[in-house]
Image (cartoon, grey):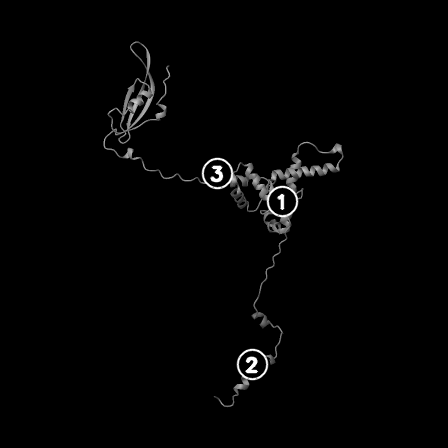
Amino acid sequence: MSPGIDFDRNTMLLTQTAHFETSDFESLETNAEAKVTKGILATAITRDDDRMDKLLEAHGLRKVTRIGARVRRFVNNSKCPISERETGPLKTAEIRDQYLWWTKRAQQDAAINGEIEKSKVQLNLQLNGEGVLECRGRIDGDYPIFLPQDHLFTRKLVEQAHLTTLHGGVAMTMAKIRDHYWVPKLRQLVKRVRSDCWDCKRLRVQSYENPPPGNLPTTRTQGTTPFEVLGVDFAGLIRYQTKGKTSKKAYLVLYGCSVTRAERKTAYSKGRSSIYTHLSCPSKKRTGNLIPPLPPSFLGQKETQP
């Protein structure tokens, strides 16, 4: 241990940190060493669904637009004299006003959520004479109406186009929509709509595979002699004339071997029931098995004379 050093005194001074003077003054050197923290603030403004949104969610767009047109006509007729009231079926202008009202509603929701600000410069969105945002491109006169992708009205519009094209594919449905509207990421939306369509699911479903074929019967695969297993079939009737120029009928009997596939043809002038009885008679000295062609059709039936 070195002389002249008091370790107890130095240790006591180091432990009493509260007695040291501190300074809260910020300098350039201290700010450069400080860790920079970044904060992200995201705000989303949502609107509660009203009765019109619930009505559109429960029914198709065609039905909802006609309901809205009827309600609008009723409101207008209640403010007009009887002589100026609208009657009869709905007009095309009334249906078009409902589509225009839903379009403005969808664009207002997109403006609240900030979707229009993201696409305003890229799509060159401008208001037309009816107060609807249009995409002004390089083609003069062709200005599609802007619609947000995630809005309920846009989805119902795609569903209606899918049904109008008779459950058309992605390209056909997109072409139908882009005749009048422009929807960002339209292909993804059309694919989601087609995946939820029950009629399209029924057409795309795969049928069950056919079961594996079973083994052939032993009578067709095992045998020692030809015509051991005999199959019988008939052809006819065949009409012929005798020497007395009388018309009679005959049948052609086909014998087939189930193992060797050999055939034999014989003509019989008797009826089919008698032929079958003759072949299946147990008194005949015949070995093997006989496979008849539909026995109920040949037993116990009377022949009709021509």
Residue 231 is labelled as none
Residue 54 is labelled as 1
Badge 1: few (under 14), some or many (20 or more) residues near its Cα, within 10 Å?
A: few
> Quick one: 7 or 247, which is closer to the camera?
247
Residue 144, given in percent of the width and then of the height, sits at: 60, 42
Mark 2 against mark 1, which lies toward the viewer?
A: 1
Q: Is residue 17 above or below residue 178?
A: below
* Chain-order first, disc 3 or disc 2: 2
Q: Which residue is mark 2?
A: 15
SS class, disc 3: helix
Marks 3 and 2, Cα distance to the nearest angstrom?
A: 82 Å
Residue 265, given in percent of the width and then of the height, sits at: 28, 23
Q: Tell me which residue sits at (34%, 26%) in the image.
A: 295
Q: Looking at numbered disc 2 in the image, what kind of residue is underneath it?
A: Thr
Is any part of residue 251 visible from this angle? yes
Q: Is residue 13 left or right of residue 292?
A: right
Q: Tell me which residue sits at (65%, 38%) in the image.
A: 67
Marks 1 and 3, Cα distance to the nearest angstrom?
A: 30 Å
Marks 2 and 1, Cα distance to the nearest angstrom?
A: 71 Å
Is there a contact, CB below 8 Å, between mark 2 and mark 1?
A: no
